Image (spheres, rainbow, N blue to C red):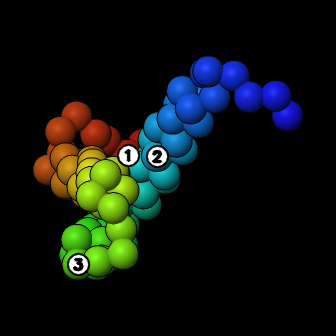
Amino acid sequence: MKTTGGDMEVLAGQLVAQGMMLQILMGHIALISPAHGASIRDTLRQGVATLQANRNMLPAEKFGAVKTLEDAIDTLEKLQAGDGATYRG
C-alpha cells in the first residue's frame, strides 16, 4: 500500500469515529439500565487510574488514552444528569 501525507489524518479520523460509536453504545446501555451505566463509568475510572500509573507509556500516549476515557465518562455523566437525553426504546 502506498502511503500519503494524509494517512495519519485518515487514521485520526477513524479513531475519532470509533470513539464516538463506543460512546453511543455505552450511552444506550446507560439509558436502558442506570446500574449498567454506573458499572461502565466505574470501569472507565479504573482504566484512567491504571493508565495514569503506567510507567511504560509515553506522556503523549497516556494523555490520549486518558482523555478518551475521560470523554466517555463525561458523556455518561451528562446522560445520567438528563442533559437532553431521553430513551424512547
**SS for callout 1:** loop
Residue at image location 21% in from the left, 50% down from the top: 74
Q: Quadrant of residue 86?
A: top left
Q: Nearer the viewer, mark 1 or mark 3?
A: 3
Residue 87, disc: 1
Query: In screen coordinates, is 80 left or right of 28?
Result: left
Q: Position of residue 22 (x, y in %)?
A: 49, 51
Let me know if residue 17 appears in the view: no
Q: Mark 1 vs mark 3: which is more N-terminal? A: 3
Q: Is residue 13 above or below residue 29?
A: above
Amino acid under disc 3: Ala
Q: Nearer the viewer, mark 3 or mark 2?
A: 3
Disc 2 versus disc 1: distance between alpha carbons? 21 Å
Let me know if residue 22 appears in the view: yes
- The residue that label 2 is drawn on is 19
Query: In screen coordinates, is 11 left or right of 64?
Result: right
Amino acid under disc 1: Tyr
- Tag 3 and tag 2, C-beta contact below 8 Å: no
**SS for callout 2:** helix
**SS for callout 3:** helix
- The residue that label 3 is drawn on is 53
Q: Is residue 80 above or below residue 34?
A: above
Q: Position of residue 87 (x, y in %)?
A: 37, 46
Observer-nearest residue: 79 or 63?
A: 63
Q: Quadrant of the N terminus?
A: top right
Q: Mark 2 vs mark 1: which is more N-terminal? A: 2
